Amino acid sequence: MNQKQVRRIINDLGHIRVSCSKEEKFTAEYLAEECKKMGIEAKVETFELPVSEITRAVLTADGKPFPCTGYQFGKNGSVDAPLLYVPRVDEINLAAAKGRVVLVDGWIRKPEYEKILKAGAVGLITYDGDVKWRDRDIDTKELRFSHEGLERLFGVNVNAKDAVKLVEMGSPKIHIEMDQKEGKADSYNAVATLPGTTDEWIVLSAHLDSRPTAPGVWDNLTGCLALLQTLEDLKKTAPNRFGVIALFCGSEERGLLGAKAFVKDHAEEIPKWMLNVNVDMIGSTMGVLKCMVNGTDSAAAWLKAYCNEVGYSVDVTQQVMSSDSTVFADKGVPALAFGNMAPRNQNAIHCRYDDGSTVFVPRILEHSAFISAMTCRLASSFRCPIERKIPKNIREELDKYLNIKKD
Ligand SMILES: [Zn+2]
């Protein structure tokens, strides 16, 4: 790929691409088409997901209205209760939560949600955005745990500026009204296949969807571009020893649902998958390329040695990444999960500012070139140097991340 091709793809796809939308479908078809243009077999695979359309979401505090988005799959109806700000979801703060609407910082994971339920709270307010930004965008959130049978609470999400106002009001009387239409809809993965001379495969993955307010250029068109670059290079020497599947995942932003659908629909193929190479956010103007190894010490040592050999600095750590790689590692397939972490305040995701202004096309090509060269090396090796093994420390991290085991 050259700079012009990268710019064309960012221009064509750098728009909001939410799970189960026509834009997500368009993106999957477009990426499959890009693979076909290289002479690589590709198709779109659909999978069905629960969807919700919020038809009413109202939040007032002491009668004063606040803009909000309703939690999809939250409770419908209305509730009146005083506010409690819970800066840390623990038993001490939650001791006063009974019969109240709690406002929490940040991301709610299942263990925290369970604690809030147990404390007897009647509603949940979360927030995102930044007090320093001029926009008043509000992301749409989903009460994922309701899909797992947990009790539903009233839930709304607000902008950070309004969250601050609510907390400064002390303990205002909160009123929430919620209504939504629930149903099912299709989401989309694009899957490209480049067979090798053996029936052993490397699975590349990058998610193609974005959050509801985000054009999703850094997160994660850049990862999709890295996969296209890698396929283009692999094709030149095909058939390589290992076959390669490139999975462009839908619905990652709703909980890795595209990758989960893929491993479920292709369960009988899992023993043939030697390795996953996942790319989620590269090419930020500032910042170092990172690789989180979901594998053994020897896997990390191999990658460090490879970086040394080719003279390219990558921050190699042994840890789980919050991305599709965890789905493969969970099934026993080791993963090399690439992403470039930007320095503080140098980039943003899941908001309107992920619009391409903070990625740098030469950097996208540079990071892609490294990932591609590494993958080509692995795909042509006589034996995959990455041990097909998930060590205990990574297994424990995976269990915690995937809510298999509580902390
Ligand atoms: Zn992402």
Image (cartoon, rainbow, N blue to C red):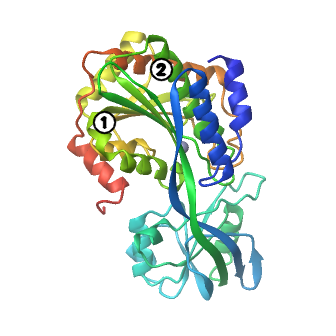
Question: Residue 397: which numbered mark, if any?
Answer: none
Label 2 neighbour load within 10 Å: few <14, some 14-19, many 20+: many
Residue 89 horizontal side relative to residue 202, left or right:
right
Disc 2 marks which residue?
Answer: 372
Where is residue 384 drawn, in percent x and y? 27, 22
Where does the N terminus fall, quadrant-wise?
Answer: top right
Q: Residue at x 70, y 56 (%)?
A: 131
Q: Tag 2's secondary structure?
A: helix
Q: Are marks 1 and 2 in contact (CB under 8 Å)?
A: no
Q: Tag 1's secondary structure?
A: loop
Label 1 neighbour load within 10 Å: few <14, some 14-19, many 20+: many
Q: Residue at x 21, y 44 (%)?
A: 392
Q: Is residue 346 visible?
A: no
Q: Is residue 334 visible?
A: yes
Where is residue 336 drawn, in percent x and y? 38, 32
Question: Residue 334: which numbered mark, if any?
Answer: 1
Marks 1 and 2 sit apart, C-alpha to C-alpha, by 18 Å
Placement of 394 over or under 388, stated as above or below: below
Where is residue 205 drawn, in percent x and y? 46, 36
Mark 2 or mark 1, which is nearer the start of the sequence?
A: 1
The amino acid on which the numbered mark 2 sits, given as a three-letter code, is: Ser
